[in-house]
Amino acid sequence: MLRCTSLHTFELDDAEAALQQLQQQLDDFGLLEHSVGILMCHAEFTHTDVLDYVCSHLPFETVGVTTASQAVHGATGELLLTIFVITADDATFRVGLTDCLQDDVEGPTAAAFAKTADDAGGPPALILAFPPLLLQYAGDIYPNVWSKLAPTSPVFGTLALDDTVAFSESETLHNGSHYTSRMPFVLCYGNIHPRFAVATIDQSNMMPYSAEITDADGPIIHGINNTSAFDYFKSIGLAKSSDDASNFLFMPLFIDFTKRDDYDGVPVMRVLTQFTDNGSAVLRGNADVKSVVKLSTFTQEAVLESTRAFVHQVTRQPINGLLSFSCIIRRMAMQSDPLLEANAFAAEMPAQTPYMFGYAGGEICPTSQQSGMPSNRFHNYTLVNLIL
């Protein structure tokens, strides 16, 4: 049987006090034979000795990322350290860490996976992955590499994040150490049966525009409806100059991968980051030729509605635990109150359901699992959820 709990501390300066707070919460819970901790914290914790001290004294390994703000039972905030603990007698957890991914993702990930899996004797029932925020890569590279290495294993996770304008302090976390370009992960084996849910804004917020991507290369859309991406957006009145990409921050692109062999009917959302000098649109994730692109409005009300509706739906039945990562742009949509979505999430959660909510620099979550093959996807603007 699998059990979960969430621990937290606001203690940023006193490592011993932080450990005592976490240990007291853990003592009230009680661990089973095998355990692992998913750790998220504000980047400030990497500048003190709290993170390393706490992790070196916990009775299980930890992996995770820095983030902007979080929520668990009893705590919502920014200068916060939280640990989502998964424990079981009939499931095991193997923690791994890649080498530097600055120049290559597949090679170091394959090497770390082989070393960590070693004699496991079968594919993981679940992979929890926490990649660094490296802007030279489209986020799709991470689930795509994992799907190549372990095609039957669902992959869930978040890219590192912080609350600086340039995300310059985003780091991944592994047993108390922190890194800018290495990926920690957990391979889960045994009696563990994860479910996944992807919450996006309602279709009623969709704009009356739909077009086909006619020329693209990974995350760069060169052509839409046989004209440049910029000219297309200009033709529908949404762009006047190449500097207008910033206007699209709260205008998600829905990419409907209709022509893909592995398409499961669930579109993914993409952030448009810039227009190039030749009129191409640069996204944070891939967009394939012949895919359909649609646009949507993205307001505070729409985000909160999708968050509340998801929590209400998923908690109708008892669950062991819930791990939730929300896109940082959903937080930006909260305008003057950066904790608004986190507080709304916390308010909807039943007291008996352990959970961790945190913000993501890019979300990794399957959209479906057909014939034993999960559709591991990279998302923007999305609230992704692991249900245990």
Image: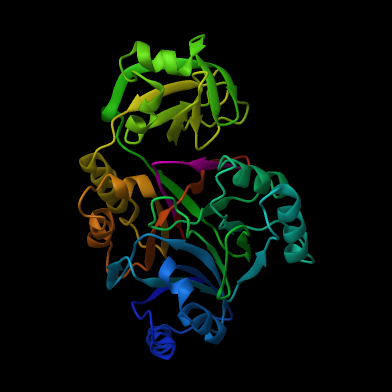
Tell me residue 361's x, y (percent): 46, 50
From this viewpoint, is residue 303 visible? yes
Across and down, in percent, residue 139 comes to 55, 43
Is 186 located above or below residue 20 in the figure? above
| Image quadrant where residue 16 sits | bottom left
Callout count: 0
Q: Which residues are magenta?
A: 374-385
The reply, left or right, for residue 58 in relation to residue 331 is right
Q: Residue at x 39, y 59 (%)?
A: 358
Residue 170: in magenta span = no
| Residue drawn at x 30%, y 22% as measured from the top left | 207
Q: Measured from the top left, where is residue 218 in percent x and y? A: 60, 30
Is most of the magenta stretch helix, strand or loop?
strand
Between 162 and 128, the one lying in front of the other is 162
Q: Is residue 380 magenta?
A: yes
Q: Give the farthest residue toward the right.
A: 119
